[in-house]
Image (cartoon, rainbow, N blue to C red):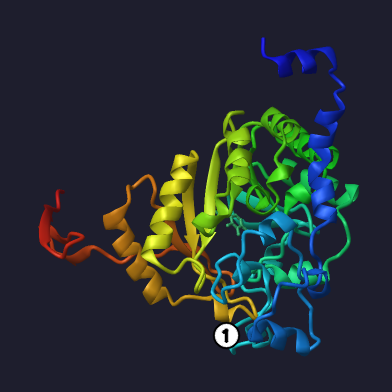
């Protein structure tokens, strides 16, 4: 028996264990929450200074110190661009809107969005450990500060009970893991009781921005509610720091499958090399790349978007570089409520009565017969 096991066995209420369990709350409280919190030697870039000069700081800044420390002073630093606002956020292009996915008409209770027949999404929290500058629910997060209450949970549970066509429930927000373990347990219990058959998905960026949130006790709690999938958002290989890989492995070792939804972001990951490394390293951490999202048309996010034409080029090249297992689906959530659709360049050149002509990745043509 290892010495530390002896120690734990003798002292189950080990103080260290409790401190470890609540470390995230301390780290969250110590996060930088405004530009004045940032360390003195962190020199603002011109584009950042210009943003703060306007005095319009509607979508707040918040960044845990360890995540902040991954960034460097370079203007195009992929971490910095995700948490630091720039003057570009004050610009709204004519096609950008406040509810870019058209979610509001599909709200069936205060916090439940039912847009696809077989899936629903619950907005469990209105806050995050880190506010991503590319957030598409920035308008929602800026205008709904009231915390989750019991009636809202009950109303969603009631809706789920009477809608058996819903097979999966996505628990999102905000970040649902801003709720502490006991609130989370309450919520999952209510939904599990109303629908013993439903599949849960937890959508959280905590493994990336506040990995100490992923504790053994959280992982044990989540594993009670299987079938449960964990969806996170790594956007750059630099984010796969040791602590983040450990957070992921706590979940994976508990039998919780982990998937990644990355967002294609200008000067963050709009390169074949960066994405190839990201997706391969995710696989090495047992995380399956699920989606690569085209940036949504949320207002003030133009400076972070990449054109779909460029996105398609990147995906085509990626397919020649990495395995099918490492490839996510490139998808766009159509503006105005059209929903998610996959974006792929068609490899089909022509369809006749007798054959389909394909082009392979190198451009060579092949025929496949049409059978009746
Ligand atoms: C993205 C999303 C889903 C899940 O879509 P999948 O393609 O199954 O991952 C469900 N509901 C809403 C409202 C969504 O935005």
Q: Position of residue 30 (x, y in %)?
A: 83, 56
- Which one is in front, 64 or 128? 64
Residue that lies at the very extreme toward the front in this rendered image: 41
For label 1, the residue is: 95
Helix, strand or loop at disc 1?
A: loop
**Looking at the image, which residue is at 40% across and 65% down?**
343
Confirm whether residue 328 shows in the render.
no
Could you tell me which residue is drawn at 53 percent across and 50 percent down? 260
Of residues 204 and 54, the one drawn nearer to the viewer in this rendering: 54
Q: Residue 274: percent from the left, percent from the top?
A: 42, 61
- When the figure is inspected, residue 290 is found, relative to residue 300, above or below; the finding is above
Out of 163 and 357, give the one closest to the viewer.
357
Q: Residues within 10 Å of mark 1 (few under 14, many from 20)?
A: few
149 lies left or right of 326: right
Q: Is residue 151 left or right of residue 107?
A: right
Q: Taking the image as four quarters, which one is ligand 1 found in?
A: bottom right
Examine the rendering and report whether any part of residue 266 can be seen: yes
When the figure is inspected, residue 184 is found, relative to residue 70, above or below; the finding is: above
Name the outermost residue toward the top: 1
Question: In the rendered view of the protein, which quadrant contains the N terminus?
Answer: top right
Q: Where residue 363 appears, x then y in whole percent?
A: 15, 65
Give percent across and percent down for residue 90.
69, 86
Residue in the image at 65% along x and 53% along y: 205
């Amino acid at each position: 028996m290892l010495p530390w096991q002896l120690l734990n066995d003798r002292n189950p209420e080990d103080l260290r264990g409790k401190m470890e369990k609540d470390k995230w709350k301390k780290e969250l409280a110590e996060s930088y929450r405004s530009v004045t919190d940032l360390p003195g030697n962190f020199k603002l870039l011109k584009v950042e200074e210009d943003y703060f000069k306007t005095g319009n700081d509607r979508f707040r800044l918040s960044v845990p110190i360890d995540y902040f420390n991954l960034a460097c002073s370079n203007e195009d630093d992929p971490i910095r661009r995700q948490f630091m606002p720039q003057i570009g956020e004050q610009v709204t292009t004519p096609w950008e809107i406040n509810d870019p996915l058209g979610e509001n008409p599909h709200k069936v209770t205060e916090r439940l969005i039912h847009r696809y027949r077989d899936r629903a999404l619950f907005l469990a929290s209105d806050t995050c450990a880190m506010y991503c500058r590319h957030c598409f629910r920035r308008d929602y997060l800026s205008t709904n500060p009231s915390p989750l209450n019991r009636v809202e949970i009950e109303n969603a549970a009631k809706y789920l009970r009477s809608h058996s066509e819903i097979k999966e429930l996505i628990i999102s927000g905000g970040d649902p893991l801003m709720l502490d373990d006991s609130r989370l347990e309450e919520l999952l219990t209510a939904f599990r009781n109303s629908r013993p058959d439903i599949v849960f998905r937890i959508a959280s960026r905590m493994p990336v921005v506040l990995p100490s949130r992923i504790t053994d006790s959280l992982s044990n709690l989540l594993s009670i509610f299987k079938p449960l999938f964990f969806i996170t958002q790594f956007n750059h290989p630099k984010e796969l720091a040791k602590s983040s890989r450990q957070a992921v492995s706590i979940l994976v070792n508990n039998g919780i499958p982990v998937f990644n939804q990355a967002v294609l972001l200008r000067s963050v990951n709009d390169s074949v090399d960066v994405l190839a490394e990201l997706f391969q390293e995710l696989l090495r951490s047992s995380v399956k790349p699920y989606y690569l999202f085209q940036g949504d048309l949320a207002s003030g996010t133009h400076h972070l978007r990449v054109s779909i034409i460029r996105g398609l080029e990147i995906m085509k090249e990626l397919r020649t570089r990495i395995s099918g297992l490492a490839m996510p689906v490139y998808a766009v959530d159509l503006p105005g409520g059209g929903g998610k659709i996959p974006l792929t360049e068609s490899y089909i050149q022509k369809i006749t009565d007798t054959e389909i002509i394909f082009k392979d990745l190198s451009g060579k043509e092949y025929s496949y017969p049409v059978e009746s």
